[in-house]
Amino acid sequence: MIVVMSPSSTKEETKKVEHKLLALGFKTHPIYGEVKTVIGAIGDKRMLDTQLITTMNGVEKIVPIMKPYKLAGKELKKDKTIIEIGDVRIGGEEIVLMAGPCAVEDEEAFYETARKVKAAGAKILRGGAFKPRTSPYAFQGLEEEGLHMLDRARNETGLLIVTEVVDTRDVETVAKYSDIVQIGARNMQNFRLLKEAGAANKPVLLKRGLSATIEEWLMAAEYVISTGNPNIILCERGIRTFETATRNTIDISAIPVVKELSHLPIIADPSHATGTWKYVNALSKAAVAAGADGLLIEVHNEPEKALCDGPQSLKPKKFAELVEELKIVAAAVQRKI
Ligand code: PEP
Ligand code: MN
C-alpha cells in the first residue's frame, strides 16, 4: 500500500508514520516530493487495522495496491477454479444448468419438474426448503421435510441438488442433504453464516447481495474461502436500481468484471433478476454470451399454482426450448451445453 502524507505534513510526522509501519512489520520506502510525500509500505495488509495509520498526524490517505480479496482474487491464483461434483464441472468448458422451482412444495409435482429439467439438459436441481421471504406471512418452505424430498429427487433422477441455507443452526442439516449449499442475496453479508457454510465442506453458491458492490461480494467470498473451502460459485441475480420495470436489474457487466478480478466461476440467475418469466429467455442468452459458467433458472410445472415466485418461473416446455437456443449461443462463445 501507499501512505500519502498531506501537503502540510512535517518530516517529523512522516518519520513517525514510517516507524509505526516498521513496527507493524512493513518495509518502508518514503519518497519525498516537492509538494507531497508518500511512503510505499510493503507487507501483508490483510490483518492491518488501517485506522492505526489513517488517524496519525499528517496522513492524508492510504492507497491499497493489492486487492483486499486475496484468496478470491486473481493476484495470487491465476488459473480458473473448476468445481467438480461427481461428473459435473462448474467453471470448465460446459455451461452448467441448474433448474427447478423456487421452493419444494408438492412432492409429485417436484419430481415431475425434476425429470423434465433433466431431460432438457439440467445437471443440477434447485428447490428451496428454507425460504428467505420478505413477508413473515408468506410460505416459508417445508424445511427438513423439503430436504428429504430433495434427497429423494436426487436418488430418483441422479441430478445434483442446490438448496439454500438461511440460518447457521441449519447448516449441518442442509449440507447433509445437498451437493451445493446456497447463500441467498439477503444473507450475502451474514458473516457467521458464510463461515459456517464454508466450514461445512460443500461447494457454496454465493448470490450477490441486493445492493452489493462487486468488491463486497468478493469479500463475502473471501469469508468462505478463508475457512479453507475454495469451492465457491458466484451468482449474479440482479441488483436494486432505480428501475422498477423488472424485479431487479441484472448486471451483465458483473460477469466479465468478476472474470477479470477473480478465478471463481460465475453463473447468472435471470429469474430473480427479472421477476418475469417472459424476460428469462433473453437474459439467459445474454448471460451466456457474456461468459457465465452456468445459469440458475426457476422452472415450475404449474407456475400459476406456485407458492413462491410463480410469475418468474418457466414451464418445463419453455425451459427445454430455451436450452436449445442456449446451445447456439454457447457454441458462438466457444462453450457447450
Ligand atoms: C432463491 O434462489 O430462491 C432466492 C431466494 O434468491 P435470491 O437470494 O437471489 O433472492
Ligand atoms: Mn425464488
Image (cartoon, rainbow, N blue to C red):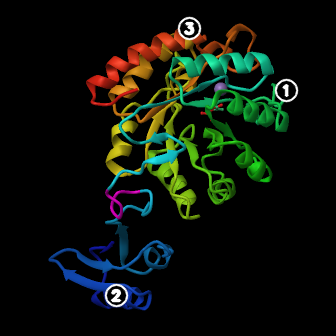
Crowding at mark 3 (Cα within 10 Å: few <14, some 14-19, many 20+): some
220 w.r.t. 94: above or below:
below
Taking depth in this image into account, of 5 and 25 the one nearest to the observer is: 25
At 55% from the left edge and 18% from the top edge, which residue is drawn? 119
Crowding at mark 1 (Cα within 10 Å: few <14, some 14-19, many 20+): few
Magenta residues: mostly which secondary structure?
loop
Closer mark to the observer between disc 1 and disc 3 = 3
At 41% from the left edge and 26% from the top edge, which residue is drawn? 337
| Figure quadrant, ligand 2 | top right
Q: Which residue is mark 3?
A: 317
Residue range corresponding to the magenta coloring: 73-78
Crowding at mark 2 (Cα within 10 Å: few <14, some 14-19, many 20+): many
The tag earlier along the polypeptide, 3 or 2, is 2
The percent coordinates of residue 193 (x first, y second) are 68, 53
The tag earlier along the polypeptide, 1 or 2, is 2
- Quadrant assignment for the N terminus: bottom left
The percent coordinates of residue 153 (x first, y second) are 71, 29
Residue 194 badge: none
Q: CA distance from mark 1 to mark 2?
A: 58 Å
Looking at the rendered structure, the kind of residue marked 2 is Glu
Taking depth in this image into account, of 322 and 257 the one nearest to the observer is: 322
Looking at the rendered structure, the kind of residue marked 3 is Lys
Q: Which residue is mark 1?
A: 137
At 17% from the left edge and 77% from the top edge, which residue is drawn? 33
333 w.r.t. 70: above or below:
above
Q: Secondary structure at mark 1?
A: loop
Q: Which residue is mark 2?
A: 18
Q: CA distance from mark 3 to mark 2?
A: 66 Å
Residue 126 horizontal side relative to residue 245, left or right: right
Looking at the rendered structure, the kind of residue marked 1 is Tyr
The percent coordinates of residue 259 (x first, y second) are 35, 44
